Amino acid sequence: MLPIKQKRRKEKSELHPRNPHRGRYDLQLLTASHPALTAFVRLNPHNDESIDFSDPEAVKTLNTALLKHYYGIGYWDIPAGYLCPPIPGRADYIHHIADVLASDNEGEIPTGPQVRCLDIGVGANCIYPIIGSKAYGWSFVGTDIDPVSIESANQIIAANPALQATVECRLQTNRHHIFPGIIREGEKFDLTICNPPFHVSRAAAEAQTLRKLYNLSTERVGASTRNFGGQNGELWCLGGEEKFVQDMIRESRQFAESCRWFSSLVSNQDHLASIYKFLEKAKATEVKTIPMGQGNKISRIVAWSFLGEGERELGRRERFTKLLEV
């Protein structure tokens, strides 16, 4: 077992200023919160303590420690082979989208369970509701097409009292739909978030996984064991990210009055041109593109609304002002 030594923590300045994961992972704090992580700590080529990010079990144990230490999650687990998300990037989405809500609230981030968020593709990990409910007290409805993911997310919710009152999961029984069958009549949300399937096919997802593992490992990789996991529906869909977001835009028009801000992560910059065309065709009244970065990975959030500024302000006066007075 390696001793845990305190190292200078280089700040990841590209992450959101409110993101608690801007520094290097503080393994001293994390192993204190979750001692099982100690077994995976090793010296990297720079003689710093780290973990083997090509080892799925090490990555999952690191996530468990992060969720315990920063988010007060006593129990967290995912089924074998399911997506184990990189928490700093997921937290960045939440903090950036909070700024979008603040833009309708005189610069103040609205907090509390009255702020309702719809998470499209909550996954077995339930990560966005965990971060959003802890950071801002928002309530969440998480949806997924996979019953195993819904069952796993519900287990996480049931095991953590802080989530029980603020997070609900709904199974999307029609995999060709995103919002129909999920948003109920008269139901209102303040925002939707989504990390869409990126790849256009299983073969493309497997090839990308092999490339990533090869870069992480000192030995050539011959099998596509995913360090961050992921089932087919989490990693790819017909048409990939571009088609998924286009479908989301088309369906969101049907629910224009049901949500203040729709949003999605867009990983591939080349997809933006067609996405903007779809938003123009759908007659979105406002579109925001928020750049995000983590290490060598550059991404962005695209957010859109069908409500005018005055309509969004009206919603703020009815609900958000009350929140700020509490």
Image: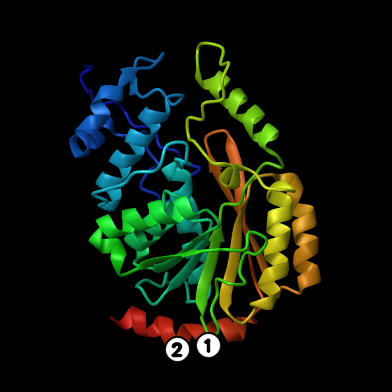
Marker disc for residue 246:
none
Going 46% across and 50% down the picture, which residue do you hit?
A: 148
Q: Residue at x 69, y 34 (%)?
A: 204
Q: Which residue is mark 1?
A: 314
Residue 184 appears in the picture as rendered: yes
Image quarter of the C terminus: bottom left
Residue 18, visible in the rendered structure:
no
Picture residue at 38% right of the left edge, 17% below the top: 44
Per the image, label 2 sits on a secondary structure element best described as: helix
Q: What residue occupies the far top of the structure in this picture?
A: 219
Q: What colouring method underlies this structural image?
A: rainbow
Amino acid beneath label 1:
Leu
Q: Nearer the viewer, residue 177 or 190?
A: 177
Front-most of residues 95 and 267: 267
Answer whether labels 1 and 2 touch (C-beta < 8 Å): yes
Q: Which mark is residue 318?
A: 2
- Residue 159: percent from left, percent from top: 26, 55
Q: Amino acid at mark 2?
A: Glu
